[in-house]
Image (cartoon, rainbow, N blue to C red):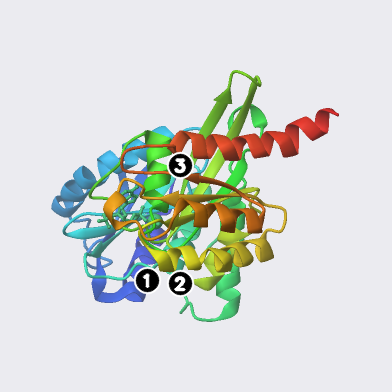
Amino acid sequence: MSIDTKKLQALLQWYKQSIGENLVTALIVNREGLVIDALSKNAEESVDEEIVGGVSALVEPVLTRITKEFSSGSFGTGTFDTEEYRFIFCEAGPEAVFVTILKAIAGVDPVFPYAYLTAEKIARIFDGRTVSPVIPKLISDSNAENIERKIEKLQKVKVQSGEYAFKLILGGDGAVGKTSLVHRFVENTFAKDYKSTIGTSIMKKECNFKELESAVRFVIWDLAGQSQFQRVRKSYLANAEAGILVYDVTNRKSFENIKNWHNEIKKVSPNISLILVGNKIDLKEDRAVKSQEGNTIADNLGLSYIETSAKTGENINDAFKMLALLMIKKYFITEEV
Ligand code: G3D
Ligand code: MG
């Protein structure tokens, strides 16, 4: 494969201009984590080996995980923070990942649209298709729509044997424990130093039921609650078959907001199957919402209710199992009749 490296470098230079001084560097790596190309200080200079070496050491563990988790399909995008840097990973075609490294103080949301667009262009360069290295200012609606389309494409994450998994989304205020819940379920770990997710990360997980001889596959989408990027949020919620509404039992406001989350999700995905989760039950002293109240609101909304702790792992598997059973009832059993 011959890659137009000049065009690649021109594109990276445009990217640098678009992002400004918060950009530390940008890399293109393959799925094994090897650097294919990187932003050089200026278009004529060759790539700074020292920066690339240091950065790929940092990026490697993350890429290893990505490669492992998404060996059978797309992973879309993900973010990752260290003390010094913030990373954005964007899939750039089947072979490459576009990695943006920002200063720790940088906001990720304004960078996202540029990262998506650049990743798309990188994929085209690798394919040998025609593409301009010029990156326009992304403020207009039509550009936002392009990004939305790209995300919709990512929705169709294919799993083994050509079957499609259910798209699962999470609703609920920031910091109620959505990301922790998913990580607990997917990896069975509770990362104490986990920082808030900005953007979307996509994980997949299969639930097996011996009793029913069925497997339910979920493709779990995790988006930051505080995302200001409304258009991304709408396509995040769209076409979802399953969802978990989460509140924090120590945070009354998050409980009161459940109705709003329910409305917003139902508006975008009317046929979604939802359950309600009251999380952080390990914090017994700080409890601000009674179990009975959780039950009542769930009854009113016609949902099943379960209480969990992503910290201790209590009821996490059962929560997902509850949802998987709903999916079986809706999609498998009714089909057989
Ligand atoms: P979000 O994805 O809904 O925004 P996160 O929430 O999963 O990022 O979690 C927000 C904070 O709550 C995190 O703390 C996380 O460790 C903590 N948390 C999540 N679930 C539980 C739980 O069940 N019990 C307890 N005690 N804490 C939980 P930090 O301090 O890292 O912000
Ligand atoms: Mg989160």
Image depth: mark 3 or mark 2 in front: 3
Q: In the image, is the residue at mark 2 within 8 Å of ligand 2 by its beta carbon?
A: no
Q: CA distance from mark 3 to mark 2?
A: 22 Å
Residue 243: tell me if it is visible: yes
Does 328 appear above or below 6? above
* Structural distance between the alpha carbons of marks 3 and 1: 22 Å
Give percent across and percent down for residue 224: 42, 61
Q: Earlier in the sequence, mark 3 or mark 2?
A: 3
Q: Residue at x 65, y 58 (%)?
A: 300
The answer to whether residue 212 is above or below residue 201 is above
Residue ranking furthest to the right = 337
Q: Residue at x 24, y 47 (%)?
A: 192
> Which residue is label 1 attached to?
14
Q: Report the residue marked by disc 3.
A: 95
Examine the rendered structure and indicate whether residue 137 appears above or below residue 202. below
What is the three-letter code of the residue carrying label 1? Trp
Report crowding for label 3: few under 14, some 14 to 19, many 20 or more residues within 10 A (C-alpha). Answer: few
Residue drawn 58% across the image and 34% down it: 217
Q: Position of residue 42 (x, y in %)?
A: 24, 68
Please state the total of marks drawn on the protein image: 3
Q: Secondary structure at mark 2?
A: loop
In space, the residues marked 1 and 2 are separated at their CA atoms by 6 Å
- Mark 3 or mark 1, which has the lower sequence index? 1
The disc labelled 2 sits on which kind of residue?
Answer: Val
Q: Which residue is mark 2?
A: 134
* Pick the front one: 300 or 188: 300
